Amino acid sequence: PTGAIVRGLEKLRGQTPKRTVHALTDVSLEVARGEVLGIVGESGCGKSTLGRIVAGIYAPSDGAVTLDGAPVARESRGTVDKLTTRVQMIHQDPFASLNPRMKVGETIAEGPRQHGLIPAPDLRDRVAALLSQVGLEPAYADRLPHQFSGGQRQRIAIARALAMQPDLLVLDEAVASLDVSIQAQVLNLFLDLRRDLDLTALFISHDLSVVRHVSDRVAIMYLGRVVELAPVAPLYDAPQHPYTQALFASVPRLGEGRARFHPIKGEIPSPLDPPPGCAFHPRCPFAGPRCRTEVPRLKPHDSRAVACHLHDGGTGATTGTSEAA
Ligand code: SF4
Ligand code: MG
C-alpha cells in the first residue's frame, strides 16, 4: 500500500513540559500518495496530537502509523529513525521553529546534511534552488530569520521541510498566524508545490475555508474522534454529521459580517471526561436516548463516512435500545 495509513490510534491525554496532549480515540485514516487530507476541528479536538503522532513526534498509546507499508518510528533520544525524516511537519509559528541565530541557508541545509541526503558540495546550490522554489531570492540564504516577514518565514519553513524530500508533509495551522492576504499567497504556493512535486499531506486547520482551498478530502474531528470524512465537494455542499453542520453554520457567510456569527451552542466538554455515548450529544439538536449511551462508529456512506446514529441506516437516534441487544 502506498501513502500514509493511520490505524486505530489512541492517545491518552497528558501534559508534556510544553503543551497539553489531547486524547484520540480510535482514529483510522488513509492518505493516498499525492493526496491532501484536511483535518478540521475546534481547539482541543486532538487534531494537533494526531499530526504529531503521524510525524513521529509523539508515540500513540495504541495503534500504528505506516508509510508505504513501513511503520513511522518515533524519534528516540539521540538518534532519529530514518523513517521519521520521511515525514516533515510545518508548524503555525515559523519564527519559533527557526533558529534565530542561524542563517536561513544553514537552517535549510542542516537536515539534509545530517542525514546525508545531499552531497556536501551540492548543498549550496540545492538551498538556492529551494529558496527560489518557495518564491524567495537565493541570496537570502545568508540572512537571519528576523530579517524576514511572517509569510517569508513560513516559506523558509516550507523550504526546510522540502529539503528533506519528505514522503508526507504534516501542516499544523500553517497559515493561521498570517494576515489573510499573506495566507492566500502561502496557500497558493502550497498548491503550486503540490502540483509540481506531487506532495502528500495532512493539512490541519480550524479554518474550513482554508482547508477547502487545498484539500481533496476532509476529516472532521470532535473530542478526539473523526466524526465525518468526505471528499471536499460533497462535504461542503451537504455536511451530514450534526457537528459538521453546526461547524459550517457557525462560519459567517460572505457579506453577513460579524453580527451573523452563530457559535455552536454549549461548551466543548473536557476531552479528559467526554460525555458517554456520542460525545456531541449535549450540544446536538437531534440527540435521542440512544445517543446518550452508545458511541456511534464511523460508517461508510457512498464516498463519505459518518459517525452518527442518524446515519447508520438502522433505527436512528430515537430508540433507546441497542440494535445488538
Ligand atoms: Fe447527534 Fe446522536 Fe448523531 Fe451524536 S449520534 S451527532 S447526538 S444524532
Ligand atoms: Mg492545535
Image (tube, rainbow, N blue to C red):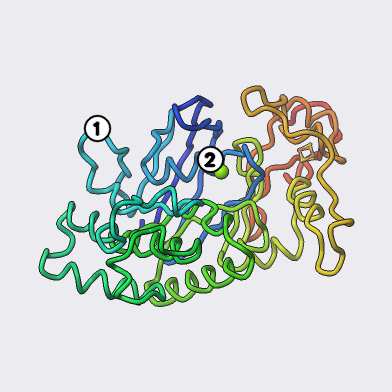
Q: Position of residue 57 (x, y in %)?
A: 38, 39
Residue 105, by quadrant, is: bottom left
- Residue 61 in which image quadrant: top left
Figure quadrant of the C terminus: top right
Secondary structure under badge 2? strand
Question: Which of pointers 2 and 1 indicates the residue nearer the eye?
Answer: 1
Label 1 environment density (alpha carbons within 10 Å; few <14, some 14–19, many ≥20): few
Circle 2 packing at 10 Å, graded few (<14), some (14-19), many (20+), is: some
Viewer-proximal residue, 222 or 250? 250
Q: Secondary structure at mark 1?
A: loop
Which of the two labelled residues, at mark 2 and mark 1, occupies the earlier sequence position?
2
Residue at mark 2: 27
- In the picture shown, does residue 183 fall above or below 95? below
Could you tell me if the residues under marks 2 and 1 are in contact, i.e. CB atoms within 8 Å? no
> Which residue shows up at 89% across the image and 56% down it?
259
From the top left corner, tell me how far across and down residue 210 is, in percent: 62, 63
Residue under label 1, please give it: 77
For residue 322, side relative to residue 122 (left or right): right
Residue 20 picture location, percent across and down = 53, 30
